[in-house]
Image (spheres, grey):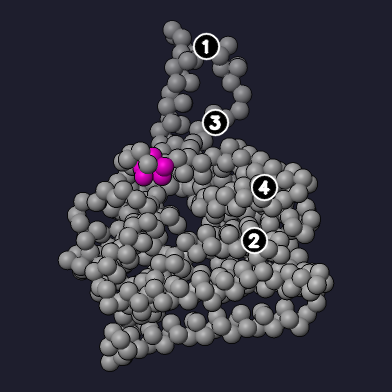
Amino acid sequence: MISRLFTQLNYDLVFAAGISFWAILILAIHQVKLSIEKNDPAIIHRTLVYFFMLNVAVSLLMYSGIVWQAGTLNPFRYQGEFQKYFISTGDYIRGITLDNSTTNAIINAFGVFYFLSRKNIVCCLSCMAILLLTGSNLVNILFCLVLLYVFIFQSTKDQKSVLVICAMLLVVFLAKVSPENKNYLSEYYDIYCNNKIPQADNKLVNIVADRSTETKQQIARAYLDSVNNLKEANKVIGGINPLLVSQITGKPAIPVANINSSLYQHKQDTTELQKRLLYFIDMNKALLPLSGKDTPVKLLYPGKVLALQQTVNYLAQHPAKILTGTGPGNFSSKLAYRSTAMNISGGYPVKYAYINRDFTTNHLDLYLYYFSRLDFFHSVINTPNAVYDQLLAEYGVLGLLSFFIFYIAFFTRHYKQLTYGIPILLIMIGAFFIDYWFEQLSVVIIFELLLLLNNKEAQIKQSLQQ
């Protein structure tokens, strides 16, 4: 109403979708709260054990499928199939939610501290194992920070031992199982802290070479060379050396292709999504200050930091929108990406596509800048996605304050009596920087269930003490 966008049919549909998301979330937390109030805590705890262990089983089943297909117990170091798995192995381990691997990582991070508090070591280490298999570097960093807090301020001697084991498992994973994840972090550190320019600092282009044909030619050439070398070795003046001939047994071995050679490294072919992104860039260069440039712009900070800067700068330039924001789907949300009809965050009818100009010149431009380039840049750290950014940009200071006053404060009202609720709350506060979690019913539902349960236990404990 304030922005006078109600006269646009396409935006009316976006607005209705945005309000519907919040209505579903309110109904969901209401249902979770009712289940906590009506059931004995012991029943909820048993249900949570089943849920987390089922998620572990599904994740292990997914990992087993990868092992079977790759033919190796450690696909994190397998470079075959043009590095289909390798450092991206964790992306395929989505767990019971069938969402992305980051969702699975956060849920298992919850599980580690939940079972640690419940003194269920087997389940705790099981969740830790799946957390590592997802290979989410950003979640691992967040997990380590919370682990350090719990180790210093909120753990017994026995719990400290388990936390040390978890930390050692993480070190072993990065050192032996998937050293590429460690190298990946080092590269990003060099880029943004040491101002090191990455080797592939350009937009994505198609690779048209026929790898399969080239591979066959190389193998055939190597085979012919080996036969010629064998003939040369057996030549003597006047004929063939019978001694050398008698030493030849079986057929000459055909050289096996080296899957670790540059020929078999990850293909940089343009995906269908990137083709759509590149086409959009070509059609709207004048509106895209970053991605519209013919040569890449050197950025000093990761995409998430730049996105927050864009939001702050935009509100500073439009003070009338500081209190109420730009409105749902207009600047920073999964809905804003979806309504572009480019299949960035799900499908959307092309005839009802809607893209706000402010979104185009800010967060969409930033997204296009990173995700139209080589997939080295396709990292969570470069996405503008963040709950805090969404609330501030689309709902203003009033929306952000409402979030802290009526949501975060609601869960922390008995913080002195909370046990596993504190580390889970810290993880969630950090995770709100990673994605638009309120637009998908996964991580937030588990968080709310665990916090409501711990709050109920705190209330029972407080009433018994009185």
The amino acid on which the numbered mark 1 sits, given as a three-letter code, is Asn
Q: Is residue 191 magenta?
A: yes
Few, some or many C-alpha atoms within 10 Å of disc 2 (few <14, some 14-19, many ≥20)? many
State the mark number for residue 151: 4
Query: Which SS class for mark 3?
Result: loop
Left or right: residue 347 compared with residue 100: left
Res 306 → quadrant = bottom left
The amino acid on which the numbered mark 4 sits, given as a three-letter code, is Phe
Res 194 → quadrant = top left
Please give the residue where the numbered disc 3 appears in the rendered image. 253
Please give the residue where the numbered disc 2 appears in the rendered image. 422
Q: Nearer the viewer, residue 405 or 287?
A: 405
Q: Position of residue 282 (x, y in %)?
A: 21, 64
Please give the residue where the numbered disc 1 appears in the rendered image. 241
Query: Which SS class for mark 2?
Result: helix
Could you tell which of marks 2 and 4 lies nearer the N-terminus?
4
- Circle count: 4
Query: Does the CB distance between marks 4 and 3 fall below 8 Å?
Result: no
